[in-house]
Amino acid sequence: MRRATLYLLAAAVLLTTALLATLLGGGGGKSAFEESAGLSPQDALTVMVEHGANCFRLRLFVNPKPRDEWGGFTGNDLDYTIALAKRVKSAGAKLILDLHYSDTWADPQRQEPPAAWRELSFDQLVEQVYAYTREVIARMREEGVLPDIVQVGNEITCGMLWPWGKICDVSNPEEQWNRFTALLKAAIRGVREGAG
C-alpha cells in the first residue's frame, strides 16, 4: 500500500467563519437576530459581519427533501445555496462551499450517495461526481458567486459515497483508497474546470 503525505497549509489571512445553512429557511428569507435586549431585530448575516465574521460556509445537498424525518429544514439545494451565496458576497465576506455529495447530511457515520446515483457503476459514479461538481461551480461562477474555497465532501474521515468510496472498516483497503482518491480527483477536476 502506498503512503500518502498530508500537508497542512496555513492561510495568511485569519478567517472568522460561520456555517450558514438555514438562514433563508427558517423565516422565509427574513431571519433576524437581536444583538441585545431592547434593540430592533437585524438581519442575521449583517449582525455576524458587523461583529467580525468574514467567511461563511454553505453546505450543498444534491437533491434534498424540503424537510428531514424530524421536520427540520434541509433545503440546501443549488438554488437556495446561490441565493444565500449572493447575500454573503454582497456583504463582502468570503464563501466556502461544502459539497456533501448526498441528498442529506454526510458525516463520518453516514455517507449515502444521492438516490439518483445509487445504481451507477463505479466508473459512472466517478464521471457523475466530475460532471455534477463542474456544473455546480460553473453555475455559481455565472451567478457571480464563485466560492473562495470549495470543500470536496463533508467530514470524509472514512471516505465518501459509500460503499464505493468507503475507507474505514473495509476488507480491501488498498482498492477502497484507490476508489476514494479517484472520486476526490474527479471532484477537484470538476471544481477547476467549472471555475473557468
Image (cartoon, rainbow, N blue to C red):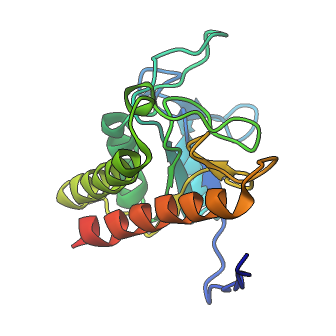
26, above or below 40, in the image = above
Instruction: Give the quarter of the image for residue 35.
Output: top right
At which x and y percent is residue 18?
64, 53
Give the side of residue 118 with respect to residue 1, left or right.
left
Tell which of 138 and 170 is nearer to you.
170
At which x and y percent is residue 144?
23, 60
Give the side of residue 35 with respect to residue 89, left or right.
right
The furthest residue to the bottom? 12
Give the side of residue 168 with respect to residue 22, left or right.
right
Instruction: Give the quarter of the image for residue 15.
Output: bottom right
Instruction: Give the quarter of the image for residue 88.
Output: bottom left
At which x and y percent is residue 143?
21, 54
Tell which of 93 and 52 is nearer to you.
93
Image quarter in which the N terminus is found: bottom right
Residue occupying the point 55% across, 43% down: 161
Residue occupying the point 28% across, 58% down: 134
Tell which of 157 and 178 is nearer to you.
178
- Is residue 51 something one can see in this rendering? no
At which x and y percent is residue 158?
73, 51
92, above or below 112, in the image = below
Residue occupying the point 46% across, 18% down: 65
